[in-house]
Amino acid sequence: MAKPTNTKGMPPSEAEESWIKHAQTEIQKEPARLEEVAKFLVGVVSISLTIFISKRPEGLADWTGAWFVTATVLWMLSVLLSFFVLYPLRYRFNEDSPDSIRKAYQKITNHKRMVLVLSLLSFFVALGLAAYAFLAG
């Protein structure tokens, strides 16, 4: 593996080397941070769903009730997708190859990020639909 160089083509200074190590550490921590966000999202979704279901007005019109049911399904989808962020998938890599490990880590991170974004989108759409159902109903 080639020795890193700075933008001037020289070996990195001690300060630059510490930033390189810091960046590598942060990249390695990213899947764990995505999992923490997923845990937080599950809590927020659960609390908001509980509030909306327990405070559901009696006189919701049929059409707004359908919006509310759709929102509830999207909320459940959001929770399910968040759990998929937390679920440890099996990724194959060569334990003796840093390049193989790095590629597997990138694959893990990209997968978790994509699923978390889908979960967030589902939650925000559900929240908007439920708010609309309450305001229109």
Image (cartoon, rainbow, N blue to C red):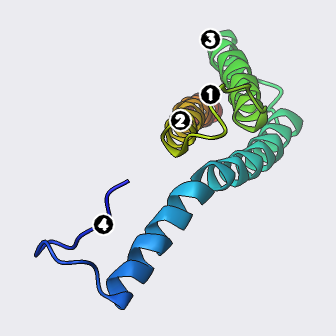
Mark 2: which amino acid? Ser
Chain-order first, disc 3 or disc 1: 3
Q: Are marks 1 and 4 in contact (CB under 8 Å)?
A: no
- Give the residue displayed 40% in from the left and 72% down from the top: 20
Chain-order first, disc 3 or disc 4: 4
Q: Nearer the viewer, residue 86 or 56?
A: 86
Q: Position of residue 75 (x, y in %)?
A: 71, 29
Chain-order first, disc 4 or disc 2: 4
Question: Which residue position is annotated with label 1?
Answer: 133
Question: Which residue position is annotated with label 2?
Answer: 100
For the residues marked 1 and 2, what is the alpha-carbon distance in whole angstroms?
49 Å
For the residues marked 3 and 1, what is the alpha-carbon distance in whole angstroms?
8 Å
**Which of the numbered marks, if any, corresponds to residue 63?**
3
**How busy is the neighbourhood of tag 3: few (under 14 within 10 Å), some, or many (20 plus)?**
few
Tell me the SS state at disc 3: helix
Quarter assignment of residue 80: top right
Tell me the SS state at disc 1: helix
In the rendered image, the vertical position of residue 121 relative to residue 20, given as above or below: above
* Drawn side of residue 48 relative to residue 131, left or right: right
For the residues marked 2 and 3, what is the alpha-carbon distance in whole angstroms?
53 Å
* Drawn side of residue 49 relative to residue 108, left or right: right
Mark 4: which amino acid? Pro
Chain-order first, disc 2 or disc 3: 3
Question: Which residue position is annotated with label 4?
Answer: 4
Foreground mark, 1 or 2, reads 2
Quarter assignment of residue 14: bottom left
Chain-order first, disc 1 or disc 4: 4
In the rendered image, the vertical position of residue 33 relative to residue 70, given as above or below: below
- Give the residue displayed 74% in from the left and 41% down from the top: 45
**How busy is the neighbourhood of tag 1: few (under 14 within 10 Å), some, or many (20 plus)?**
many
Q: Nearer the viewer, residue 127 or 132?
A: 127
**Which of the numbered marks, if any, corresponds to residue 59?**
none
